Image: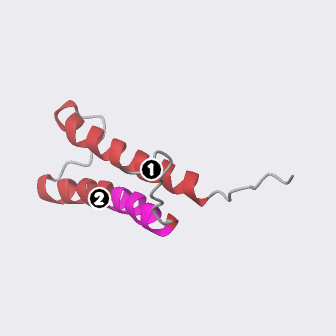
Amino acid sequence: MPEENAEFRIPKKVIMAGYAALLALGLMIYISWGLMYGSWNVFDRSNLGIYSVTVVLCGFGLVGLVLYSLKDEQPQN
């Protein structure tokens, strides 16, 4: 039976790489969709689905990168 307080720590570089991959994937989807279909108009209703996927991926990527780039402040005793 494993210990109750056992924690598995993922290195910060791995997490930052994952968020950077989300950001890159969102940008690649946006650029490839625009190149394949020639639709760069964000306000066109027929492209709403692809832009919503792009915004979610890029949003999570940016927010994750910003949050993990903040320095951890250790409280002093």
The x, y position of residue 27, in whole percent, is 32, 57
Check disc 2: other Cα within 10 Å, few if <14, some if 14-19, many if 20+.
some
Check disc 1: other Cα within 10 Å, few if <14, some if 14-19, many if 20+.
few
Is 38 left or right of 41, judged from the image as shown? left
Q: Residue at x 41, y 57 (%)?
A: 19
Q: Residue at x 46, y 63 (%)?
A: 16
Q: Residue at x 51, y 64 (%)?
A: 12
Residue 17 in the magenta stretch? The answer is yes
From the viewer's perspective, is the residue at label 2 or at label 1 nearer? 1
Q: Nearer the viewer, residue 74 or 65?
A: 74
Three-letter amino acid code of the residue under disc 2:
Leu
The x, y position of residue 14, in whole percent, is 43, 66
The image quadrant that residue 35 belongs to is bottom left
Question: In this figure, which residue is indicated by the disc labeled 1?
Answer: 3
Three-letter amino acid code of the residue under disc 1:
Glu
Please determine whether, in this image, residue 49 is positioned above or below residue 25.
Answer: above
Q: Residue at x 80, y 51 (%)?
A: 75
Residue 73 in the magenta stretch? The answer is no
The numbered mark, 2 or 1, whose residue comes first in the sequence reads 1
The x, y position of residue 66, in whole percent, is 56, 54
Q: Which residue lies most toward the top here?
A: 45
Q: Secondary structure at mark 1?
A: loop
Q: Which residues are magenta?
A: 13-25
Q: Secondary structure at mark 2?
A: helix
Magenta-drawn stretch, dominant element (helix, strand or loop): helix
Q: Which residue lies most toward the front here?
A: 1
The image quadrant that residue 26 belongs to is bottom left
